[in-house]
Image (cartoon, rainbow, N blue to C red):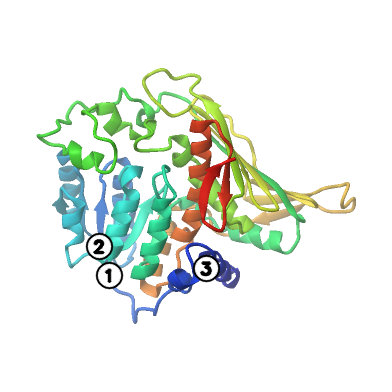
Amino acid sequence: MELDRREFLKLSTAGALGATALGAAATGVAAQPAPRTIRVGVIGCGGIGNAHLSILSQLAKQGEPVEIVAVCDVYQVRLDAAARRVGARPYGNYKELLRATDIDAVTVATPDHWHARITCDAADAGKDVYCEKPMTYWGSLDYPKEVVRTIARTNRVMQVGTQMMSDDIWDIAGKRIREGAIGGLVHAQASDMRNGNIGVYSPLSNDGLAKPGENLDWDLWLGPAPKVPWEPGRYFAFRAFWDYSGGVGTDFFPHILTPLVYTMGLEFPHRVTASGGLYQWSDGRQVPDIFTLCIEYPGGPSIVLSASLSNDINMPMMIRGKKGTLYFEGPGAVIEPQRDWDPEGKREEVARTRGASHEWHFKNWLDCIRTREKPRSNEVLGYHVMTALHMGITSYRTGRTMEFDPEREIARPV
């Protein structure tokens, strides 16, 4: 499986943005001579950033040679709390953190609209990067393209924070698919359905402490986004606004689309269309509470993804083939034969040996920093995923089906 995955990365990267520019990214660079303590700066100290602090601290306690040396946030309340918690140097501007020579790598847990810029600036500063999902902001394919080019040019190691990728069922199931266990791929589906007054989607969210100009740099937080007056909801619930996020399309879908793309060995989609709406929530949010994508890949399969903020009943995650259907359930997966194709076929249970884990996902990144190999959820895989998500959100907002031009690597309405 490892050799197959490396070969896949070589081929997919050569097709993305040119073989010459990205050949180094696909094959890696010279291995470093020995393990060393990796010194990390954490950029963004909200809920996800604090999760990064917890995971890295726990790994250090378990003997992993890693140390948190710096933290960064535009909000002084969060910055001070994070610095006290782990005893790290505080920075109010990420560019100052990147200038520090005692930092080897950074994690990025900012709103989506900053992901590409901070990732590229970090790579140019010689830092390896763990960037939360989505890899980039949904609004343009220029963002993931720039990330892929920069990581290749600087020979950095990048992991996207889709921690479900740490589950080895995707490798095991992918191997059975390549062995022909379910025949030619025709369809796949997955969902992430939730319900309730989720604070990070509520524009009414406000901690009552944030005061732009006193303890929060609002202009720096907006960065490349349109300049608007301070609104607490835009800061505390940025996922609810198109200027900073794609809503559930870029919050939920990277976790379920990335493993499907990986398991089936897919690259760029052919055509994407989306539907849904803001049916239940009227609190000022802009993103839909029901969202469905249909992604068609060249020659198949099609993938249907659904997400909800108004109902929490999920549909089963599965991959359909001409000869059988692979269901992800229980201790791994189950393959059920298609009786019309194989009347004597037997049900097959496919067990995982390692489940999904935040800690393992971070450890994979740290190991790859030392070996200079590609992490499981690397930037090339992220580019393929972001292409589908960019096309889907654009389809939803324009009411047009989007088609991908593989020669020019652009998306356009049909």
Which of the numbered marks, if any, corresponds to residue 37?
1
Q: Relative to 180, is 362 on the left or the right?
A: left
Task: Give the SS element for disc 3.
Answer: helix
Q: Amino acid at mark 3?
A: Ala
Three-letter residue code for mark 1: Thr
Q: Nearer the viewer, residue 8 or 372?
A: 8
For the point 80% across and 52% down, which residue is it?
Answer: 323
Side of 99 relative to 371 (left or right): left
Q: Residues within 10 Å of mark 2 (few under 14, many from 20)?
A: some
Q: Amino acid at mark 2?
A: Glu
In percent of width and height, residue 271 lies at 61, 45
Single out the mark in the foreground, 3 or 2. Answer: 3
In the rendered structure, the answer to whether residue 55 lies left or right of residue 353 reads left
Q: Earlier in the sequence, mark 1 or mark 3?
A: 3
Point out the image quarter for the C terminus. Answer: top right
Q: Residue at x 42, y 46 (%)?
A: 140
x then y, percent, for residue 310: 50, 24
Q: What residue appears at the point 45 percent right and 69 percent down from the top-left corner?
A: 22
Q: Looking at the picture, tell me which residue is in the foreground, 243 or 70.
A: 243
Placement of 337 over or under 287, stated as above or below = below
Distance of label 3 from label 2 (alpha carbons) = 35 Å
User: What is the quadrant of the N terminus in the image?
Assistant: bottom right
Counting residues from the start of the chain, the first of labels 3 and 2 encountered is: 3
Rendering coords of residue 353 (x, y %):
58, 59
Q: Which residue is mark 3?
A: 14
Residue closest to the far bottom? 33
Q: Which mark is residue 67?
A: 2
- 382 vs 73, left or right, is right
